Amino acid sequence: MAGPPIAVRSQAAGDSGRCWPVFHAQRNHALNAYNLDPKPRDLADAAFQAKRTDEDFAAVIRSGGGAAGLSTGMPPWGRTLSERKVRNVVDFLRTFPQK
């Protein structure tokens, strides 16, 4: 990884619009998880992360959960985020503390 993900730099610069997908997901998973069906995955789970490649994560970010046989509640971001930003989100996911 060349440095912190754009999402983190953007937040520090006060540009919450650029990091909305990541921080929106964190906020909603934390505050609203009990309402979601299926329940959101714990992305900090070491076993879960070990089974997924960076490309697996990128494909779900680009195409949404439904395209990967997961929840359709995760929308696709491929037309919104550049490939670089998709990669930065994947890099950010890999920074989650492993449980």
Image (cartoon, grey):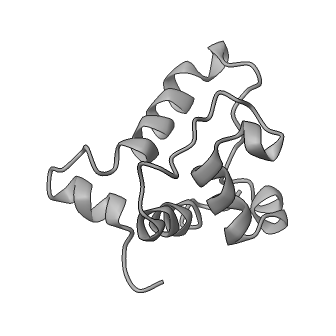
| Quadrant of the image occupied by residue 82 | bottom left
40 horizontally vs 50: left or right? left
84 horizontally vs 8: left or right? right
* Residue drawn at 35 percent across, 58 percent down: 7
Looking at the image, the residue that sits furthest to the front is 79
Q: Is residue 44 above or below residue 41?
A: below
Looking at the image, the residue that sits furthest to the left is 13
Q: Name the quarter where the C terminus is drawn.
A: bottom right
Looking at the image, the residue that sits furthest to the bottom is 2
Q: Is residue 40 above or below residue 86?
A: above
47 horizontally vs 67: left or right? right
Q: Nearer the viewer, residue 72 or 52?
A: 72
| Residue 22 place in picture, x, y as percent | 45, 47
* Residue drawn at 24 percent across, 53 percent down: 11
Q: How many numbered callouts?
A: 0
| Residue 33 place in picture, x, y as percent | 62, 23
| Residue 81 place in picture, x, y as percent | 42, 55
* Residue drawn at 45 percent across, 67 percent down: 88
* Residue drawn at 69 percent across, 44 percent down: 42
